[in-house]
Amino acid sequence: MLGMATIMVALAAPFQLFMGDRHGLNTLKHQPAKIAAMEGIWETEKGAGLLLFAYPDQQNEINHYEIKIPNLASLILTHDFLGEVKGLKEWKKEDRPPVVWVFWSFRIMVGVGILMIIIGSVSVIQYLRGKLFQSCFLHGWWISMMPSGFIALLAGWFTTEIGRQPYTVYGITRTIESFSSAITGPQVAWSLIAFIVMYTLIFGAGSYYILKLIYKGIPVIKEEEQFYKHGIGASVIDAGTSGKGNNHV
């Protein structure tokens, strides 16, 4: 099971990085305000830096506690070190998404994705060295990464859905115009609660079963038990044993 997971993560995680790059280029073209919120960019600039850490202040239109890599945002978004990236000030305040939510959910998604790539790469190296199934540290790391896919999915969903606010159809229909008078608030709430309960039960049961298998470990079968399992009788084993003994007489 661990071997299959290693192969899957080693192949799928880098592919997700490639697809994310393609999706980012598409989003920059069709939903540039979302990109500006994801990157925490307020002023339109060429050679925009990539913010590793910051606290966006939407009211004052600035970032606090910035840690930035120069030009990297432009390189990622436009494939040009001096590419232009529009800032949030290009749009009216009422047309901007909630920046803090989009900024941090995007970083959580990317951070989890990077961890997936790292653990996949380390596991492949350990497999080639013949140590994949003996590393207790690596096994513990894999266990801690169990909810990572779900976390990345939720963070990506938050980035996408909150990032297109205040629109349902970007630039055309606002979210406030999209509600249905035929559906009440309690109906929506109960359907949401039902989804949460259902997925919690499914995810919880699956996690419990997998953890139980992991902690149980691989059963150790004695050599004699393997003979019996494959239909070789005790007489054959005894004959072989007695034969070995006769050679010493």
Image: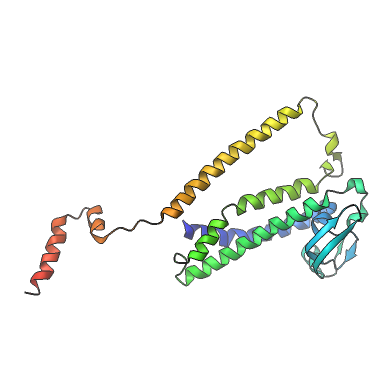
Does residue 48 appear to the left or right of 113 in the view shown? right
Toward which corner of the image does residue 36 lie, by quadrant? bottom right
Q: Is residue 245 left or right of residue 74?
A: left
> Is the residue 244 above or below the residue 139 in the image?
below
Residue 177 appears anywhere in the view: yes
Question: Is residue 86 visible to the viewer in this orientation of the structure?
Answer: no
Residue 245: image quadrant is: bottom left
Q: How is the image coloured?
A: rainbow
Q: Residue at x 83, y 52 (%)?
A: 99
Single out the residue that lies furthest toward the bottom.
248
Answer with left or right where residue 172 lies relative to residue 52.
Answer: right
Q: Residue 78: image x %, image y %?
A: 81, 63
Which image quadrant for residue 69? bottom right
Q: Tell me where residue 138 appears, x and y as whole percent.
A: 52, 64
Q: Position of residue 124 (x, y in %)?
A: 52, 67
- Compared to 181, does 35 lie above or below? below
- Residue farthest toward the top in the current orientation of the protein: 182
Give me the residue at 14% from left, 64% from top: 240
Image mark count:
0
Q: Residue reaching furthest left? A: 249
Could you tell me residue 185's position as x and y percent?
76, 29
In the rendered image, which quarter contains the C terminus?
bottom left
Residue at left offset 85%, top offset 39%: 174
